[in-house]
Image: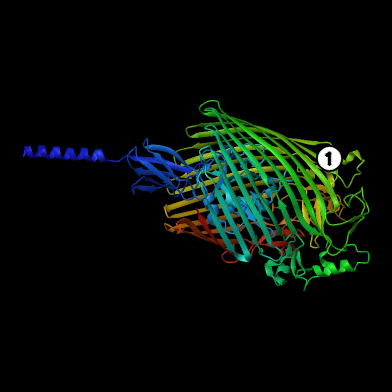
Amino acid sequence: MRKYLQKFSVLVFSMLLTVGAFAQSTIKGKVVDAVTKEPLIGATVGVKGTTNGVAVALDGSFKLNANTGVTLVVTYVGYNTKELTATSTNLGEITLDPSSGTMKEVVVSANLNSVAIDRKTPIAVTTVSATFIEEKLGNQEFPEMLKSAPGVMVTKQGGGYGDSRLSIRGFKQANVAVIINGMPINDMENGAVFWSNWSALSDVTSSLQAQRGLGASKVAVPSLGGTVNIVTRTTDAKRGGSVAQSVGTDGYLKTMIALSTGLDEKGWAFTALGTKTQGNGNAGGLNFVGYNYFFNASKVLTDRQTLALTLIGAQQRHGQRSTKSSIETYRLAPQGIKYNPDWGYRDGQVVNVRDNFYTKPILSLNHDWKINDGASLSTVLYASKGTGGGGSSNFSYGSIPRTGDSYSPFDIDAVQDANVANPDGSAINYLRAARNDHEWYGAISTLKKKLTPEIDLLAGVDLRYYIGRHFTEVTDLLGARYLIDNRTGTGAGDINNPIKNARVGDKIIYNNDSNVAWQGGFLQAEYSKNDLSAFISVAGSNTSYKRIDHFNYLDTDPLQTTPNKNYFGYQAKGGANYNLDANHNVFANVGYLTRAPFFNVAFVNNTNVPNPVAKNEKLLSYELGYGFRSAIFSANVNLYRTDYKDRSSAPRQATQNGQTYYANITGINELHQGVEVDFKLRPVKEITLSGFLSIGDWTYTNSVGPVTVFDETNQPVPGQTAVYYNLKGLKVGDQAQTTGGLNLDVSVAEDLKIGGNWNYYANYYSDFSYTSASTTSPNGAPLNTWKMPAYHLFDLNAVFKFKFAGLNSELIGNMNNVFNTNYVSDALDAANSGKAVNSVVFYGIGRTITTTLKVKF
C-alpha cells in the first residue's frame, strides 16, 4: 500500500508541476485616449492569433489571463489598433490615437496644452470623442454635441444654419473661451463665436471637451463660465480616405470626401477634407449653403521635432430669423412655430431680408520640439482673414406690403415697383449689410521644463493683433438707381460726404475700424507624484484698443483716430486632485481674474469718446469635486460658486418693427452657484447608460445706472435717457438653471448599435428687455421676467456597419426631437412682467430625421 501511495504522490506532484508550467499569468492595464486620457469604454484587448480576449471596464482597466511575452492587440472603434508585447503583468496605461477611418495620425502635442486629464486635472470636465460625434450629430449643430454635459446648454436661437449659442453655468457664449488646437477663436472685440464659421469642425474633431469653471487652458485666456477645447485631427499616417452622403428633413444634404496620402519614408503626410452642406431650413427663409474645408500637411523633421500646417474654414450663406415673435403670433400664423417674418419673394425667388454670409479661414503652423528628456517647446503661429456680415434692411415692418396676410412673406416685387415709380429714382426701401471684415494674427509658445521628477514648470507667451473694419454696405437698391444718404448728426452717415447718392457697394450709416492688440504671458507649476497632482498658475495680459472713425469725424480732425486705450488684466488659479485609491478621487480649485471690458464698452455710443466708467470685469471662483471609478460604474459630483463683478454689457435688441436698440451698461454683479452630477453605468459590455443632473442658482445681485439707450443711428431713444435697471434678485436668463439627461447605447449585435438620449430643461427664465426695464429711480421696484415652461426632448440614433464592395462602410440614422415637442428655446420678456403674454420667443426645432452613408477606403 505504501508503495502505491508513493507512486500516487509522485503522479499528483508531476501533474501539479505540469499545471504550473502551463498556468497563465494575469496581465492587467488601462486603455485610454491618447489625447484626453479618458478611459475607452468598450475597447477590447486580446492575444494575437487567438480568441483569448476581454473588454475593458468603465474605468478603462482590464485583466487578461495570458503569459508575459505574448503580443496583445488593443482595438476600439474610431481609434488606431495597437499591438504591443506584454513585457510584464502590469502594462500600466495603454494609449490609443483617435482617428477617422481607423487611420493612424501624426499628433502635434502643441495642440494639447489645454486638454484636461481624468483623475489628474482638478476641474469639472466632459469629453466627447470623434466616434460620439459621428454617431450622434445628424443635422444638429456642432456645439449641440455638448448638450448632455452638466451645466451646459445649447439652443439654435432663430434656427439659422450655424446660429447656435452655447452657455455654461449661466454664462453667455461670449464669456466661454473656445479654443481650437490651442488657438483662441472668440472675437477679440466682443468675445462672440459664430458657429457657422466653424461648421467644418464636425468632420475633423478628434476630441471635444467642455471644461466647466476655471478650465485647464494654459494660454492667457480668461475663462469665466468655462472653456470649450477642440482638438482636430492632424494628418493621417496611412493612405486612404472616406466619402459620406447625408440626407435629411427640410431638404438637408451633405456630401463629404476625405483623402490622405499617408506618411511616406521622408516623413511627409497630407490630408484634405471637403464638404458641401445645403438645405431649406426648418422655417421659411432659412435656406442655406456652406462649403467646408480642411487641409493638413505634416512633416516629421527628426525624431524630436514635428511641423504641421493646417487650414480650416467654411464659406457659407444662410437665411436668418432674427425677430422673436409673441406666442400668440405663432398660434395665429398658418406656419405655426415655423413662422418667420424676416424674408420675402421677388420674381418667385426667396429674398433673405435677414441673412448671414461669411468666410473666415484660419491658417496655423504648429511646431513641436522635444528639446531633451526634460524640456519641450510647443509653438503655434496663426492667421485669419474674415470677410462678410449680416444682411438687414431699412424696412419698417408694419408698412411693407406682404404677399398675403400679415403672416406671409414680404412682397419684394411691390417694394421694387414703388422704388421704380419714385419720381427722382431714389430708393424708398433697400437692403443693406452690416459688414465685419477683419485680419487676425497670433502666436502662442509654451516651454515645458521638468525641474524635478515630480515638478514641471510651464512658461509661455500669447500675442495677438486684430484689425476690424466695420461698415454698413448697400447690397440691393430694389429697383432704384441710388440711395440719398443725406442724414446729419452722430451715427447718421459720412460727415465727409453729407449729401451722398449711394449705390450698391457704397458705405452708409457708419464706417469705423478697430485695432486690438494683446500681449499676454503665463507661468504654471505642476506637481504630480503617486496619487497627488496639483498646479498653480499666474497670467497677465495687456489689451490695447484703438478706434478709427471715418464717418463721425472729418478726415482733417486729429480725433478721427484715438490713442491706444489700455486695460491690464491678470489671473491666478490653482487646484489639486488626490486619488484616494483606485476608485475614489477628490479635487478642489480656486481662481481670481480680471478681464478688459469688450471693445464696444470702451468707447461711448460707438464714437471715439472713451467711456469714463468702463473698467475691468472681475471674477472669483472656487469648486469642490468628487469622482468614483469602478469596473462597471463611474460618477462625478461638483459644487461650485462664482462671484462675477463689474460686468459690462452693450446689448443689442431687435424690436418688433425690425429696428435695433442698444445700451451701454457697466457695473453689473452676478452670483453663479450650483451642483452637478454625472454618471456612467456599464453592467455588461454591450450596454452603456450615462446621465447627468445640474441644479444652478444664478442671480443678479445689484442695480445699475444711469444708462442711456440708443437706436442704430446712435440717437437716444425718447424716454430712455439716464435710466436705471433694478436687477437685484433677478434670475440670469440665458440658460435653464435645472437640466438633466440620460443616454443609452446598446450593441445589439457586432455590427449594429442603437442609442437614445433624453434631455430635460427647467427653471429657465427669459431675458429682460433693456428698453422697457428702465426706471428713472435708482431704487424702483425690482424687475421680473417670465419663467418658461419646462420641457423634455428625446433623440434616437442607430449605426449599422457592413462591407460595401469589400470596403468598411456604415449606415447612420438620427432622429432628433422624436415626439416633435413644441417648446420655447429662447425668450425675451418685452415688458418685464413675468408673463408669457408679454414675451417674444423663438420656438425650438421640431422633429428632424437624417440618414448618412459613409464608406471608408
| Observer able to see residue 161 | no
Residue 645: image location, x then y, percent: 72, 42
Viewer-side residue, 215 vs 532 = 215
Viewer-side residue, 297 vs 183 = 297
Q: Is 36 displayed left or right of 722 in the figure?
A: left
* Mark 1: amino acid: Pro
Residue 241: image location, x then y, percent: 53, 51
Q: Residue at x 65, y 60 (%)?
A: 278
Residue to which mark 1 is pinned = 612
| Observer able to see residue 449 | yes
Residue 20: image location, x then y, percent: 24, 38
Q: Is 356 displayed left or right of 846 in the figure?
A: right
Viewer-side residue, 265 vs 637 = 265
In the current view of this chain or complex, which residue is farthest to the left? 1
Tell me the SS state at disc 1: loop
Q: Residue at x 64, y 33 (%)?
A: 445
Residue 7, picture quadrant: top left
Using the image, determine if residue 267 lies above or below residue 715. above
Residue 468: image location, x then y, percent: 77, 44
Q: Is 145 displayed left or right of 29 in the figure?
A: right
What is the quadrant of the N terminus in the image? top left
Q: How is the image coloured?
A: rainbow
